[in-house]
Amino acid sequence: KLGQVQRSMASVCLYIGLQDTAENLALPKTNFWIYPGPDYRGQVEDFLADPDNRDIPLTYISFPSAKDPSFTERYPGRATIEIVAPGPFQWYQQWADKPWGKRGEDYEAKKDAYAQRLLKKLYEKMPHLRGKVDYYELSTPLSTDYFCRYSSGEIYGLDHTPQRFEQDWLKPKTRLPGLYLTGQDIMTCGVVGAMIGGLLTTVAVSGLKGLPLAKKMFVG
């Protein structure tokens, strides 16, 4: 049955270090979702067909250090940014048999070319950050495979198509005694989907004992 459900597109992630605090740099505690236009499906298709000459169809920018009240205390004078964008596994597949950290200059050059495009997206929104970035590193689908064992560098688990939601086996309790599933793939994508998936699995495992936890999450 797993073959009936497709994995999502792979991604790249640009990790950025800055030479000042989130407060001084006016980094927001919200995220940016940058789309070049309203025709998302068409822009994805255009981008995949000609990635070097088409705009990135989605750029997600997050500001982790701005959201962490203890970050400045732990890392004085520093701040961080993450940028996530589509990055098909096929772009990097020729280096898949190379060891992590030793994939060669061509691989590093390809990564840096995309990293520069993502930095440009950041500076378009926040031009005052030019000159403040003193470190950046791009992870590719090969990195995701190496660290997370997602064989094609997928992001957000299974595709959220009608066929995916028709799979009656995607639920906390499986037919195998003692085997439970959790996370976003039993619910819906993203952080909230993963959180609710964890709650459902907790209740499935603990029965009525898990209800106080559910009440605490939703009532506070």
Image: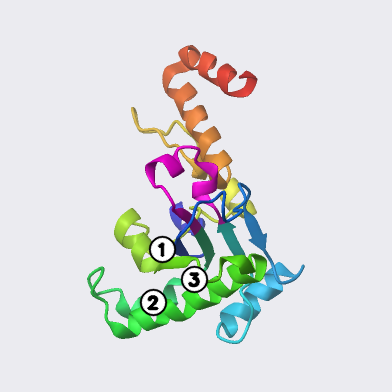
Q: Are marks 3 and 2 in contact (CB under 8 Å)?
A: yes
Q: Position of residue 151 (x, y in %)?
A: 36, 62
Residue flagged by tag 1: what amino acid is it? Gly
Q: Which element is circle 2 on?
A: loop
Amino acid type at image mark 2 = Tyr
Amino acid type of the residue that numbered disc 3 sits on in the rendered structure = Gly
Q: Secondary structure at mark 3?
A: loop
Q: Is residue 75 magenta?
A: yes
- State how far apart marks 1 and 3 are (Cα): 9 Å
From the viewer's side, name the closer residue of 136 and 214.
136
**Which residue is disc 3 drawn over?**
87
Judging depth in this view, the residue of 134 and 159 nearest the camera is 134
Asked whether residue 180 is drawn in magenta, I would say: no
User: Quarter-wise, where is residue 92 in the image?
Assistant: bottom left
Secondary structure beneath label 1: loop
Q: In the picture provided, is 14 more to the left or to the right than 177? A: right
Residue pictured at 57% horizontal, 39% vertical: 192
State the residue at coordinates (58%, 83%): 49
* Residue 19 picture quarter: bottom left
**Residue 153: which numbered mark, if any?**
1
Q: Position of residue 87 (x, y in %)?
A: 49, 71
Q: Evaluate if marks 1 and 3 touch, with contact meaning CB atoms under 8 Å apart.
A: yes
User: Which image quarter: residue 168?
Assistant: top right
| Residue 121 vertical position relative to residue 174 in the rendered view, above or below | below
Q: Magenta segment, which residues?
A: 62-81
The CA distance from mark 2 to mark 1 is 10 Å
For the question of whether residue 148 can be seen, the reply is yes
Residue drawn at (46%, 12%), measured in percent from left and top? Answer: 209
The numbered mark at residue 92 is: 2
